[in-house]
Image: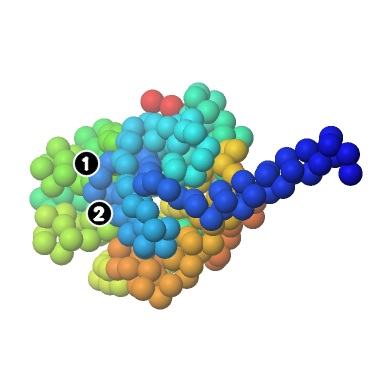
Amino acid sequence: MNIKDAWRAMLALLVLLAGASHAQIYPQRPVRLIVPFAAGGTTDTLGRFIAQPLTERLGQQVVVENRAGGGGIVGSEVAARAQPDGYVLLLGSAESFGMTYDIAKRLGYNPEKDLMPVTMIARAPNAFVVHPSLKAYTLKDLIGLARAHPGKLHFGSPGVGSNPHLIGELFKTRFKLDMVHVPYKGGGASIIDLMAGQIETLVTGLATVAPRHTAGRARALAMTGNARSPLLPEVPTMAETGVDEFVLGALFGVFVPSGTPPDVTARLARELGAITQAPDFRKRLAEIGQETTEPLAGAAFGRYMLGEVKRWRELAELAGVREQ
């Protein structure tokens, strides 16, 4: 072997050793988990449930960072633009891709190119909620009030183009209702305004409404899952109220910036997969009204999420939802 060949062999060995070393030492510092909604809502609760066991499995602190705004878009863009080194994760959903064609066109990033899917985490149904002073004790009552007072009822959501926003718009379209949408930066902010009487109704996650419903500070009328939730067993499904084909919910998963090293994404997928399949995690999900999903990771999860996004965009078109 001549000197040139020896140098080439040494360089190849160094590259292999560097890769092996990188796989062994990740992570060396705290990891940020970006939640693209405000604290106190459904996505935030799920993010904190993930951060605790992931901290233990990675051996480094996983810090939840709330970056609210734009119905989930602001935080998603922060993640998409981050250094692809595994130290910034995104708890993303269909909102991260733009759930209406209008919003998708104005994204400051390309979710399909700039975000890399790691693994699917959970699915969460929503609930239709009213202020306790509103004389609506069933979904039928709410429909009657909205028809009797067109343009007078306000419904809140975590933001324009968010999952709850589109659910509310589809509800309006189905029953030909005139209600005013009020967007917030998260489910936590919307429930606070509802309890204060600033809005009359909202669509939000079960974890957000359950303690307020139990305390009598808000009233859940119906939920969009395919079965009643143990979190709110007395609240009927949409089908039970007579509204068929209205099983809808948010799908959550973890993403990283594109270009993140394969060994890092593989480690994250492995650890997150173990977390989501653990009985304790499944129990905690049920306690906040969320459901576990099939174990999908990588490209398979990415294809599934794109199918979910396509479905929501078609529903948004059907409901006539446009950027506000």
Q: Position of residue 141 (x, y in %)?
A: 24, 54
Q: Position of residue 44 (x, y in %)?
A: 31, 49
Q: Identify the amino acid type marked 1.
A: Ala
Q: Position of residue 43 (x, y in %)?
A: 35, 50
Q: Earlier in the sequence, mark 2 or mark 1?
A: 1
Residue at the location (48% across, 67% down)? Answer: 274
Q: Is residue 287 left or right of residue 76?
A: left
Whether residue 119 is visible to the viewer of this picture, yes or no, is no
Between 13 and 199, the one lying in front of the other is 13
Secondary element under disc 2, as helix, strand or loop, is helix
Q: Is residue 302 left or right of residue 222?
A: right
Secondary element under disc 1, as helix, strand or loop, is helix
Q: Identify the amino acid type marked 2.
A: Thr
Q: Is residue 251 above or below residue 295?
A: above
Q: Position of residue 24 (x, y in %)?
A: 53, 55
Any mark on residue 208, and which? Answer: 2
Residue at the location (37% across, 62% down)? Answer: 56
Q: Which residue is mark 1?
A: 189
Q: Is residue 252 left or right of residue 193?
A: right
Q: Residues within 10 Å of mark 1 (few under 14, many from 20)?
A: many
Q: Is residue 248 left or right of residue 133?
A: right
